[in-house]
Image (tube, rainbow, N blue to C red):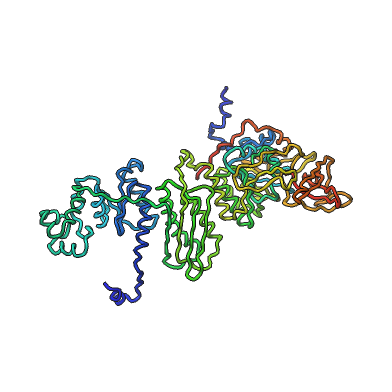
Amino acid sequence: MNFAEVLQRPDIWRAGRAAPMPALATGFAPLDALLPGGGWPFGALTEICCARAGIGELRLLLPALVELARGNRWIAFIAPPYIPYPPALTAAGVELARLLVINPTTRADELWSVETSLRSGACAAVLSWAEFADAAPLRRLQLAAEAGGAWGVLFQRRTLSNSPAALRLRLEPADGDQLNVHVVKRRGGWSAGPVRLDPNHAMAMPAPARSVARDLHPRRA
Amino acid sequence: MRVGAAYTLIPDLAVKERAAPAERAALERLAAWAYQYTSFVSLAAPAALLLEVGASCALFGGLTRLLDRIGRGLQTLGYRTNCALAPTPLGALWLARAGAEARVTDARALFNALAPLPLACLGLERNGEALLAGIGLTCIADCLRLPRDGLARRAGPEVVNALDRAFGRLPDARRAYLPAREFHARLPMPAPVDSVEALLFPLRRLLGELAGWLTALAAGIPRLIIVLRHDRSAATRIDVNFSAPTRDAAHILLIVRERLERTPLPAPVEEISVTADALQPLGSCNLDFFSGARAPAEARAHLTERLQARLGTEAVHGLDQRADHRPESAWRFSAPGQAPTCSETNTVGGARPLWLLPAPLLLEQRDGRPWWRGALTVEDDRERIESGWWDGGGAARDYFIARDAAGARLWVFRELYDPRRWFLHGVFG
């Protein structure tokens, strides 16, 4: 092992560089290469903008969800557009015991549910389909995700300006059932992409060996 | 002073009748709460508690820390107390009655501590006290200077007995108080209350007592009953259920608060009462040293309880599969966190979409193709599902994967028999 390799270790803090963030591998190597930490940011919000449901936005998250469902914290689906279908989830390898489906009736309850789930520390991932008109409530959700050590995913139809999310992606369909992923914003780097992925391939892939997130503890502020 | 005389002095005086049973009940609840700090609690009616703390010092990190904790806990409960520490129970009782916040740890210092106390703290009856005052005694030191047999003849043997017990020359056996297996507390409001925020103050106190009682018994409760009494309407009863036995006062308060906010109050609340009767053993859990987090299962249960308290139990679910070929019956909502009951996976059929519509959506047809926000391109592979004729929910369908104009993959089906309509059943996410 030479000095350069030692410097690449994640547990070495270098004064000039931003702190390495805990991240969960996405399961798609081209996307991992673009993201800081090599995966989905933990303790922060990820905003995914796709104009139309069904182009592969949930399949993009599946490898990470498979990994998280083996842990001991909830994966919460808040205000999903349709019913998350258990046979398909089981076929993809997601264990059902850790899934929580929350259907609030009012808008205020939607926001409250997302914030409470993020802050509680009992959720490993919070997937929300609540639409936000502006980015003002997102600051609170970002802080809640930090406090609870959760991975928050907000699906939006339209991009929001001034969003404080740590990672912002825009998805567009490409031909042949593939997906173009634009990284609109990421911590510690410029916007990047588009990366062309086949979201179906992840379903056949085994769990990546260097996934990080199983025992992340929530940080108590 | 008579009540009439008091009224002449202050015309608008507010007078309340003294409720001795309520005072006794409050004292017993406080004794149950104090049971978490020591294994020997004794009642000294009407308004005193004796706690033997010598054996608890090591567990709570020293005498000072233990007394501070007890003092803080009593303040949170809302009681004003005088605390005193002495080697003998009667000595501590007299010091507390006199209002001296004394901490006497040494038997020799006990004499100096008790000597200046007035005779009122002996707790004698009125004529006994008058008798001693009549012969010129004002404080305990005066009593000690008199010859014992003379004092016993004049004032009765109880006084000498009490002095002996206070100074440790005679044993002082007390009856231990054992907490009841049920908790029932009532708190009348000083004024009618109609806002949830104002109800939280008395609730916090009652739940603090409840938590202390549960800690003392090393138990948890799976349910709680709160009754709000109104002046002219029927009482409002709120049943709070927990998915696992708990004794965490903060969590219980959160859940009760959510339920209160969702419960309409017909009239201002005059009295609030809390009842807990189903005890279940609940050991302590070790906190994680670095993060201070509680056990994962408990944290998960707390979150679902909070969500269900605010959104209703029908809005929070887990997921489970069922062994059925019909797609709409192959799944069901379950209680959150319940272990999946069906482990059979669909090995025979084709790909299943990640999203299922609650009910199949009828699609209109244009030019022989199904149409939904644009013409759908249907792929050739089909899956035929024909099942369920035995329970009336028969399904005879050909399922296809279709692609819409925006590139989304959809799961559609066509009925096998007339009318052969197209339906949308799922979306591949």
Which residue is most to the top? A1
Furthest residue to the front?
A: B390
Residue A201, compared with residue B20, is above or below; it is above
Judge whether residue A197 can be spotted in this image. Answer: no
> Which residue is painted at 42% across and 62% down in the image?
B187
In the image, residue B337 lies at what x, y percent?
59, 44
Quarter of the image where the N terminus of chain A is located: top right
Q: Is residue A31 placed above or below B337 in the rendered structure?
A: above
Q: Which of A112 and B52 is in front in this view?
A: B52
Look at 34% across and 63% down and name the residue there.
B20
Image quadrant where residue B145 sits: bottom left
Q: A203 left or right of B57?
A: right
x and y percentages locating residue A48 in the rendered image: 68, 45
Identify the residue shown where x is 43% and y is 68%: B191
Query: Image check: B117 left or right of B14?
Result: left
Q: Where is residue A109 in the image (x, y as percent from the top left)?
A: 60, 55
Tell me residue B67's x, y (percent): 33, 48
Does residue A87 appear to the left or right of B116 in the view shown? right
Number of numbered tags placed on the structure image? 0
The outermost residue toward the right is B367
Please name whichever residue, B318 or B14, is drawn nearer the observer in this view of the structure: B318
Q: Describe residue B281's horizontal placement relative to residue A89 as left or right.
A: left
